[in-house]
Image (cartoon, rainbow, N blue to C red):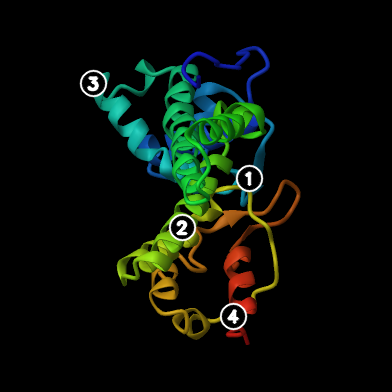
């Protein structure tokens, strides 16, 4: 469905998506987190932030970082010539691999998770299909936003935890924690910094898995009009809820 539907109007552009695409190009082509290069080569867009006289993407960087392998492979296939890949072509590829395929994976996971409720095969097909085609997952699945990749991390973590409840292992909660730590590819929710590594470690493998990405985010600029770069240190909100429920928070 992602390959078939391609809502993109070159004359209007899609600043929300292009700012992410520009960052991917800037990292690979210019070796920089500043998107000055792509802006000069492909045109100005509105979703930008300015810091110290340079332009940056004003979006969470996760989806742009996840798109690096997609762009590198595509660039290699055209002889490492960035000009050989149009923005529309690269956008289509990134949408497929970073939005469409994650949405399809979520549908498959939901189908099998619903089997735990002993629903019939037809009901599971209907409910999983309704999620993929009848909810906001569908538009997010055809646009270069981070929501579906983040949702895949969450559903994958839930699936691993559910499996671990039936067949306990050390690996499942470790992987679930890692997925929870990477689910902030979507637009970030800013909440007060509250938790410490020691609180995560009390969760055992789940906490250890969450630790590597915990609180580690690139320097990103403030929104347009804010002075200078800022470093946002955040803790994942959903994990915070888990910590509170288990009574291991500070």
232, above or below 92, in the image: below
**Element marked by disc 3:** loop
Distance from disc 2 to disc 3, alpha carbons, whole Å, reads 38 Å
209, above or below 224, in the image: below
Distance from disc 4 to disc 1, alpha carbons, whole Å, reads 35 Å
Residue drawn where x is 32% and y is 25% of the image: 74
Q: Which residue is mark 2?
A: 157
Q: Nearer the viewer, residue 139 or 173?
A: 173
**Element marked by disc 1:** loop
Q: Nearer the viewer, mark 1 or mark 2?
A: 2
Q: Nearer the viewer, residue 188 or 226?
A: 188
Distance from disc 1 to disc 3, alpha carbons, whole Å, reads 31 Å
Distance from disc 3 to disc 4, alpha carbons, whole Å, reads 53 Å
Q: Earlier in the sequence, mark 1 or mark 3?
A: 1
Q: Which residue is mark 4?
A: 246
Residue 89 point in image, percent of width and height? 44, 18
Distance from disc 1 to disc 2, alpha carbons, whole Å, reads 28 Å
- The reply to whether dot 3 and dot 4 touch (C-beta < 8 Å) is no
Q: Residues within 10 Å of mark 1 (few under 14, many from 20)?
A: many
Q: Which residue is mark 1?
A: 58
Q: Is residue 201 left or right of residue 54?
A: left
Distance from disc 2 to disc 4, alpha carbons, whole Å, reads 17 Å
Q: Is residue 59 left or right of residue 35?
A: right
Q: Is residue 204 left or right of residue 18?
A: left
Residue drawn where x is 63% and y is 87% of the image: 250
**Element marked by disc 2:** helix
Q: Earlier in the sequence, mark 2 or mark 3?
A: 3
Q: Which residue is mark 3?
A: 79
- The reply to whether dot 2 and dot 4 touch (C-beta < 8 Å) is no
Residue 198 point in image, percent of width and height? 48, 85
Specify the quadrant of the image occupied by residue 93.
top left
Q: Earlier in the sequence, mark 3 or mark 4?
A: 3
């Amino acid at each position: 469905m992602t390959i078939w539907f391609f809502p993109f109007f070159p004359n209007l552009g899609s600043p929300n998506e292009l700012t992410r695409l520009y960052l991917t190009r800037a990292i690979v082509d210019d070796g920089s987190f500043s998107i000055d290069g792509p802006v000069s080569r492909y045109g100005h867009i509105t979703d930008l932030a300015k810091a110290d006289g340079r332009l940056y993407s004003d979006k969470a960087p996760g989806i742009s970082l996840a798109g690096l392998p997609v762009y590198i492979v595509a660039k290699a296939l055209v002889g490492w010539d960035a000009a050989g890949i149009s923005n529309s072509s690269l956008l289509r590829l990134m949408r497929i691999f970073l939005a469409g395929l994650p949405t399809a994976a979520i549908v498959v996971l939901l189908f099998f998770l619903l089997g735990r409720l002993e629903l019939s095969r037809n009901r599971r097909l209907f409910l999983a299909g309704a999620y993929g085609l009848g909810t906001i997952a569908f538009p997010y699945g055809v646009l270069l936003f981070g929501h579906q990749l983040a949702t895949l991390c969450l559903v994958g973590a839930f699936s691993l935890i559910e499996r671990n409840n039936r067949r306990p292992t050390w690996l499942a909660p470790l992987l679930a924690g890692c997925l929870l730590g990477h689910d902030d590819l979507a637009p970030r929710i800013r909440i007060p910094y509250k938790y410490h590594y020691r609180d995560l470690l009390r969760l055992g493998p789940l906490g250890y898995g969450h630790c590597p990405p915990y609180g580690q985010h690139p320097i990103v600029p403030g929104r347009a009009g804010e002075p200078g770069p800022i470093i946002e240190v955040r803790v994942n909100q959903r994990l915070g809820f888990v910590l509170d429920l288990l009574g291991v928070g500070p």
